[in-house]
Each structure stands twice: as C-alpha cells, then as structure tokens.
Image (tube, rainbow, N blue to C red):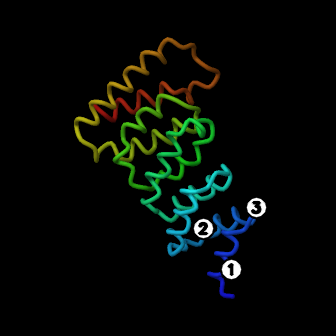
Amino acid sequence: MNSFEALIEDLESSILEKKIETIKYIGEVQYKEFEPILLKLLSNEEDINVLNALALSLGKLECNEAVPILMNYIRNPKFKNTRGSFIYALLDLDCREYFLDFARMICEGDFEVYSHSFSIFESIVDDVSYELKFEAKKILERQQKIELTKTESKYPQYERINYINEALELLN
C-alpha cells in the first residue's frame, strides 16, 4: 500500500486520534491533493476536535474553498464557544465576502475570536467597497458606545475597545 492509500485509510479511521494526527500531517506537509477529501470531511464531521484539525490544515493548505464551510460553522450557535480555531484558520484565506461578519465578531466573543477577527478585518479592509465599510463602521460604533460604559479590566491592552478603536481608524 502506498503512502497515499495509507493516509486515506487513516482519514477513514474510527480512531479519532489517528484521524486527527493524519489531518494535521496533511496540512503540515502541504498535500494539496487531499483538499477535496478534507473539504468533504469538513462538511460532514461533527467532532469538534476533528473539525478544528480540518480547519487548521485547510488553512495551511490555503484552501479558499473551505471559507464558506468554516463561516457556516462560525455562525452556528452550537460552536459559539469553540470557533476560535475556525477563525484562526481563515487568516490566510480570501474572506472579503465576509467582511461584515468580521466586523461583528470584533464586537463579540472572547479574546481569541475578536483578536483573530480583527487580523482578518485589517487584512481585507482595503479590498472592500465603500458601502461595506460604511456598514462596518455603524456596527463598530454601536459596540464602541457599549464598551465605553464598561469598567476597565486588569489587562487593558487586551480589551475589545482597543480592537474596535483600531478597526474604526482603519475605516477612516
């Protein structure tokens, strides 16, 4: 059996650890020929650990076809507390179509969500229309008002308000 067949067998394994290690390996060694298989797995998988591995490997493979699937997971309330890896996986992918989603995510979620969302927002802000920038500005300004009413935390450098303010500066 050649290595391609062995990897396919590992991807079909019922042993999650083996499946996850194989998915990670494929991303690290840049086996682009596995993109269709990983995309199919991503569309049909339910285990969050496998989903995270798939998302990160497809991100490393720079597989833009994964973007809509990952955005569906990100928007799914079931994954509200586990979407950080999905967003991180999008850092090097073409996410311009989802610009307003990233503006919204800067305004919600935990540090991992809003910091990665800001990074994506920052990387695509120059490539979106004036209309989208205008809508993003309204979203961010609304949340800015809310954030200004909150008391400062012990770690002000990590506060959401800083990311909102920086995003607004990028829009000006």
Of callouts 1 and 2, which one flags the residue occurring earlier in the amino acid sequence? 1
- Residue 142 or residue 36, whichever sits in front: 36
Image position of 103 with respect to 15: above or below: above
Instruction: Name the residue rendered at 40%, 34% in the picture.
Output: 103
Circle 2 sits on which residue?
28
Q: Residue at x 47, y 46 (%)?
A: 71
Please give the label number shown on residue 117: none
Q: Nearer the viewer, mark 1 or mark 2?
A: 1
Instruction: Tell me which amino acid carries mark 2.
Output: Glu
Classify mark 2: helix, strand or loop: helix
Q: Name the quarter where the C terminus is drawn.
A: top left
Please report whichever mark, 2 or 3, sits nearer to the chain's N-terminal start: 3
Q: Nearer the viewer, residue 136 or 168?
A: 136
Distance from label 1 to label 3 (Cα)?
15 Å
Q: Residue at x 33, y 31 (%)?
A: 136
Kindly report which numbered mark, 2 or 3, lies closer to the viewer in this rendering: 3
Quickly name the residue at label 1. Answer: 6
Q: Which residue is mark 3?
A: 17
x and y percentages locating residue 64 in the rendered image: 42, 59
Give the secondary structure at mark 3: helix
Are the residues tagged 1 and 2 within 8 Å (C-beta)?
no
